[in-house]
Each structure stands twice: as C-alpha cells, then as structure tokens.
Image (cartoon, rainbow, N blue to C red):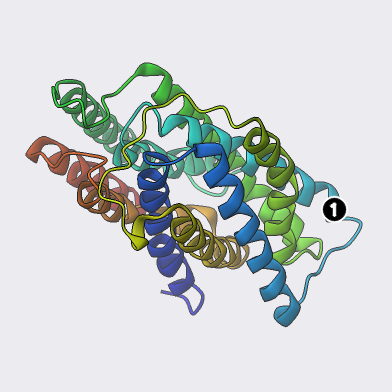
Amino acid sequence: MSNQRYTAVLATLFGSCSDATLDYAVSRYNVHKMVFLLTLIAFIGQLVIGAFIGIECTFKALPYVILHGVLIQLGYICFIKALKYIPIALIGLIQSGNLFIAMIIDSVLGYITLSLNFAALLVLFVFAIALFTLNSMQEKDNTFKTVKPIGIVLTLGTMLFYIIATYFIKIAAAYGANEITLNISYYLAALPYFGYLSLKGKDDNKKNISNPHWWNGFYFLAVVIGILETIYYVLETFSFINDAPTIVVAIKQMGIFVMFFLSVLFRTDKFTKPKLLALILGFLAIIGLYFN
C-alpha cells in the first residue's frame, strides 16, 4: 500500500457513514432541506480546510474543475433520488461497478489489457446484484424499501457521472488545481440547486418521525452528515489525485458492508442471509478484479 493509499481507506469509512446516515435522515425529514443544510455545512468545512492548506487553481485547470463540479452534482442528484426507491446497500453494491467501468476505460486508453478472468468476475458481480435485488423485491415488510427499476437506473447514472468525474480530477490536478478547489466546484454547483428546492419545500414522501431524540434531530443529523461529507470529499479527492482511479475505486468497495450494517441499525433496510451473501459475492468479485 502506498503512503497515500490510507486516505482512500479513511475516505471509504467516512463516505459510507455519511451515506448511511443520510439515508436515515431523509427517511425522517424533508430531503431537500436536509441536503441543502448539510451541503452548506460541508461547503463551509471545505473553506475552513482550504484556509489552512490553500485553494489552488490555474486558468488551464478551470474548465476541468467546472466539469468535475457539474458531474459530481449530477451524480449526487441521481443518488438522492435513488434513495427513495432502493436500499442504500444495493446502491453501494451497484456503484461498485465503477471499478469495471474504470478498467474498461483504462483498457481503451491502453493502460491495461482485459482478460477472460475479467469477464468471469463481471458475471459474478452481476449475479450478486441480481441476488440482492430479487431478495429486496420479495420483502413484504412495508417499513423497508423494496426495489423499483427507476432506482437502479438512477444508481447507474450516479455510477457513470462519478467515474467520469474522477478522470477530470486527474486532469485538473495535473494543470494545477488542488483537492479543495475541486471540492468547492461541486458545492458552488450544488448550493443554488438544493437551495432552490429547499425553498420550494415540496416533499411528498411519508416520514418516520417516531422516537424523537437529540441524536436523530434534524439539525444534529445535518451537522453530522455535513462534517462526515467534508472529510470524505477531501480524502477521496486527495486519493484520486495521488493514485490510479482503479486502485481507489477498489479500496472503496469495502464500504458496502459498512452501509449495509448501518442501514440495518437505522432500520432503513432489513438483514437477510441472501443480502449478506450477495454483498460477499460482490466484494469477492471486486477483490478478484483488484488482484487480477
């Protein structure tokens, strides 16, 4: 493991906790108001960190910085919408397909050569997603989310936008932009959008606001997610700058287990043996691909 690779591990832990907590938060409160507040908190967090380590950009890097921000925003919009239709652990599992896409892109660019092992691991990965999906669709308990096709489509959109954005990170960094600048580009795109939706205040989803406590209050959750997201984006962007996208994406896949167990704890998903088996198979496919 390189000296910088530990940041990808930490990014995975913070990102998984952030996503699972967000899934719980939007099951209780207005999704647009929650996302706007946590985005504002995370934006302030980026500025504070930038005051210490610097905010660097050049005119050459600026177009790629802007494109990165737009792509991350589009991916996040798809992610937020997907939370309505499928469990967070399945979103994480599908997003693990980023590694396959990254390897295909790297193959087209001539960085690597694909093999029959790649095809076999891809089949195993698809099977794992199908197993998790079918088990979710069979659940009868209405307190848990069941899979809807639109959720899978939105998650695929998230996956594509995010993986393309990673390559703009590499280009922008090569031209002189640092991780804080790249992260701020996302928040400058996100704040007006989520601010507008927050002011509209439209959210027709039924909310579970039972058992109110200080730790599951609106503002406390927003602050926690905002802090987690701040740290996550700094660590992840730093990792993509200093390492190959396929390596960082591979390391991030352990986050599917964190998200699954947290979602069970938060009661936004249900623990079943087929789901756990699906996660294990998907993880093994990713690990096999990593060492392929």
Can you see residue 85? yes
Residue 269 in the figure: left or right of residue 122: left
- The picture places residue 34, in percent across and down from the top left corner, at 52, 46
The residue singled out by tag 1 in the image is 62
* Residue 159 seen in this snapshot: no
Residue 98, relative to residue 141: is it above or below? below
Q: Residue lying farthest right?
A: 59
Residue 96 found in image quarter: top left
Identify the residue shown where x is 18% and y is 47%. Answer: 280
Q: For the point 51% across and 75% down, which residue is it? A: 4
Depth check: give the residue in front, 98 or 156: 156
**Rendered location of residue 65, percent (x, y):** 77, 52
Frontmost residue, 29 versus 17: 29
State the quadrant of the N terminus: bottom left
Q: Quadrant of residue 84?
A: top left
Name the residue rendered at 51%, 62% in the picture: 223
**In the picture provided, is 59 more to the left or to the right than 166?**
right
How many labels, in total?
1
Q: Position of residue 55 (x, y in %)?
A: 78, 70
Residue type at tag 1: Leu
Q: Residue at x 42, y 26 (%)?
A: 205
Q: Is residue 77 above or below residue 290?
A: above
- Label 1: how many Cα within 10 Å (few below 14, some 14–19, many 20+): some
In this picture, residue 166 sits left or right of residue 137: right
